[in-house]
């Protein structure tokens, strides 16, 4: 069986439509929405609303970890605008294109910038959404854990450590552990371009050590120090920043 795996799609619906070519199934590990493009400041919801110049300044502040200043800039820009309505309208437009691009079958979970309550509106037959749940593909048990952990970034789908750990525990033993964020290892959580550690999950790491899945697949860190490493017998793989590469990671078994 051949499974293609993508993560961090961030609005790339045209590449997503090709991602399942030659595969028996597509697995998507989230972050469909493009809110702010760190590579091209003219792209994304923030730039559409406030212009590339403000997007560049916002990226600069966040990259420098000057989060309070970033929040102040954001608050000034949003003053007088119904933020929830404006963002939801933009997200709906992106989801309409992205979910239409999913091949059949697709198995997907949420990223930290996704809005889970909107997914049932756009997921078509052939797209299965899983979070804290498992599915069997080609005789292997795949477990899915969506979202991220709470950070100063305040992205839409961040949950507490306890809630995240409960979702990991609900999976039990799996052959392929699929998540948006990586296990909490410095080699897998450090972004060499942003020059910061992203939050990884200790619950994922503990599950890997305890249950020893064949693979742990994830994304979230766009330019990791290590894209692939072993934890015991488990192959831990960052499947890549799909928006940048347009190429899925391939799992054959």
Image: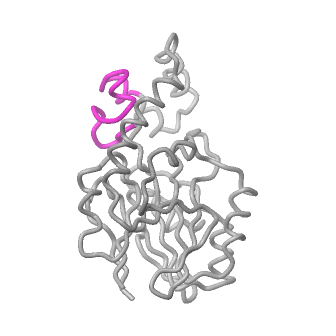
Query: In the rendered view, would you say 75 is above or below 21?
Result: above
The N terminus sits in image quarter: bottom left
Vertical position of residue 246 compared to residue 20: above or below: above
- The scheme the figure's colours follow is one colour
Image quadrant holding the C terminus, namely bottom left
Q: Which residues are magenta?
A: 36-57
Judged left or right of residue 130, residue 203 is right
Report x, y in % for residue 29. Answer: 46, 61
Q: Horizontal and vertical percent for residue 34? A: 38, 41
Among the 4 quarters of the image, the one containing residue 51:
top left
Residue 221 appears at what percent x and percent y? 45, 57
**Viewer-side residue, 36 vs 99:** 99
Number of dots carrying numbers: 0
What residue is rendered at 48% in x and 59% in y? 190
Q: Please give the name of the residue rendered at 60% of the width and 61% of the height, measured from the top-left corner.
A: 131
Name the residue nearer the viewer: 128 or 169. 128
Considering depth in this image, is 60 or 203 the residue closer to the camera? 203
Query: For this view, does 62 lie left or right of residue 207?
Result: left
Residue 221 falls within the magenta-colored stretch:
no
Residue extending farthest to the top is 80
The residue depicted at 52 percent of the width and 60 percent of the height is 129
Rendered view: 176 above or below 114: below
Judged left or right of residue 180, residue 32 is left
Farthest-out residue, front: 125
**Image x and y of residue 232, in percent:** 58, 87
Taking 186 as reference, is 102 left or right? Answer: left
């Amino acid at each position: 069986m051949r499974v293609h795996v993508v993560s961090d799609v961030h609005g790339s619906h045209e590449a997503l439509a090709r991602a399942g070519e030659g595969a028996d199934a597509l697995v998507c590990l989230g972050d469909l929405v493009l809110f702010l493009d760190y590579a091209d400041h003219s792209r994304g919801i923030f730039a559409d609303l406030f212009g590339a110049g403000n997007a560049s300044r916002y990226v600069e502040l966040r990259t420098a970890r000057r989060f309070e200043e970033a929040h102040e800039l954001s608050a000034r820009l949003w003053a007088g605008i119904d933020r929830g309505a404006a963002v939801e309208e933009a997200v709906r437009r992106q989801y309409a294109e992205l979910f239409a691009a999913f091949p059949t079958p697709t198995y997907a979970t949420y990223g930290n910038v996704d809005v889970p309550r909107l997914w049932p509106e756009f997921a078509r037959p052939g797209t299965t959404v899983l979070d804290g749940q498992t599915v069997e593909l080609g005789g292997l048990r795949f477990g899915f854990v969506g979202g991220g952990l709470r950070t100063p970034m305040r992205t839409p789908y961040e949950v507490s450590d306890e809630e995240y750990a409960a979702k990991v525990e609900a999976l039990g033993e799996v052959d392929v552990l699929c998540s948006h964020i990586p296990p909490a290892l410095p080699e897998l959580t450090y972004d060499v371009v942003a020059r910061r550690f992203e939050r990884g999950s200790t619950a994922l790491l503990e599950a890997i050590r305890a249950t020893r899945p064949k693979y742990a697949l994830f994304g979230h860190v766009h330019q990791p120090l290590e894209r692939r490493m072993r934890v015991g017998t488990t192959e831990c793989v960052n499947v890549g920043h799909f928006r940048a590469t347009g190429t899925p990671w391939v799992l054959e078994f």
